Image (cartoon, rainbow, N blue to C red):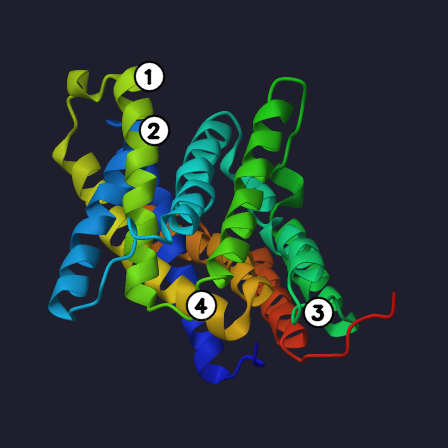
Amino acid sequence: MREANTFDLSLLIFLAIIWGSSFFNIKIATYSYDPITLALVRVIFASIPLLLICKLRKIKIEAFTENWKLYALIGLFNIAIPFVLIAIGTAKINSYLAAILMSTTPLSGSILAHFFTKDEKLSLYKSTGVLIGFGGIILLFFDRVIINSENYIYALITILGSTFYCIGGLLTLKLKSKKNENVTTSTTLWSILFLLPFSLILESPWNSEPTIASTLSLLYLGVIATGFAWLIRFRILTVNGLVFQTQVAYLIPIFGIIFGYFLMNEIITWRVLVSLVIILIGIYIFKKNNKPLES
């Protein structure tokens, strides 16, 4: 993995902007769609343009070839499971707590990458950068977070969901020699197969009456925030590594607040700006590769 340059950092910020814009779209979509069905329709919308891209560029889709097991595992761990767990978890906790819990992804990603990759061992710079970035998130939300006996299970479910993103990312690295479009499309197709029976059995989606607004938000979540964003994520993963990619979780809440300012008349305080500076400092320190810590 190479040290991130300006273009790599720009891609990370762009990815954070896309996913930061997902907050209010998810909220609108939940008015009409149950959690599993929401995840299912989201990945269906994502798969359509991905299939068209592969067809136009004559890229072979390997979802159901001899390598199908790895694509299936990634579809399960990287999309189906975390989408559902996070939908369940965040339904019962406030958005501020959800932002902090989702921002544990770089922490769990650092630990998993240290033990399961050869070139992403923990180093002084990496550890310091990750912790500083997490400190920026704590500063942003520390006075709005409540964990009690009623929501701690949902908090744990949310953390588990974010951890599955890291596990899925590790598995995805095994396919880094494959074409981006193939990997993204193949894993998305497998996630549809996993989500479909649960949606049909548990949520009876044929009884729902989705609004146009919810469906348009879900279309955006599928095409842009899943399909297009996953192509960017795969590129960052394979070029800069798992831990650098997971630091997008620090930027997402910041851009979520910025979108809230323009679209929902929310207030941007001094704390938001200071937190953004701290997070960017943490990411900058992280990308300064240092030798692994001695064990």
Mark 1, secondary structure of its residue? helix
Mark 1: amino acid: Leu
Can the viewer see residue 203 in this picture?
A: yes
Q: What residue does disc 2 label?
A: 36
Mark 2: amino acid: Ile
In 3D space, how far apart are the residues under numbered discs 1 and 3 (Cα atoms)? 43 Å
Residue lying at 33% horizontally and 23% vertically, measured from the top left: 198
CB within 8 Å, label 1 to label 2: yes
Q: Earlier in the sequence, mark 4 or mark 1?
A: 4
Q: How many C-alpha atoms fall within 10 Å of the one at disc 2: few (<14), some, or many (≥20)?
A: many
Q: Picture quarter containing residue 218? A: top left
Residue sitting nearer the eye, 5 or 72: 72
Q: Nearer the viewer, mark 3 or mark 4?
A: 4
In 3D space, how far apart are the residues under numbered discs 1 and 2 (Cα atoms)? 8 Å
- Asked if 290 appears above or below 66 in the picture, the reply is below
Where in the figure is residue 116, as x and y percent of width and height?
Answer: 66, 58
Circle number at residue 126: 3
Q: Residue furthest front?
A: 66
In 3D space, how far apart are the residues under numbered discs 3 and 2 (Cα atoms)? 36 Å
- Asked if 97 appears above or below 174 in the picture, the reply is above
Circle number at residue 176: 4
Residue lying at 64% horizontally and 63% vertically, measured from the top left: 117
Q: What residue does disc 1 label?
A: 202
Q: Is residue 294 left or right of residue 96?
A: right
Q: Nearer the viewer, mark 2 or mark 4?
A: 4
Residue lying at 67% horizontally and 58% vertically, measured from the top left: 110
Q: Earlier in the sequence, mark 2 or mark 4?
A: 2
Q: Nearer the viewer, mark 4 or mark 1?
A: 4
Can the viewer see residue 269 in this picture?
A: no
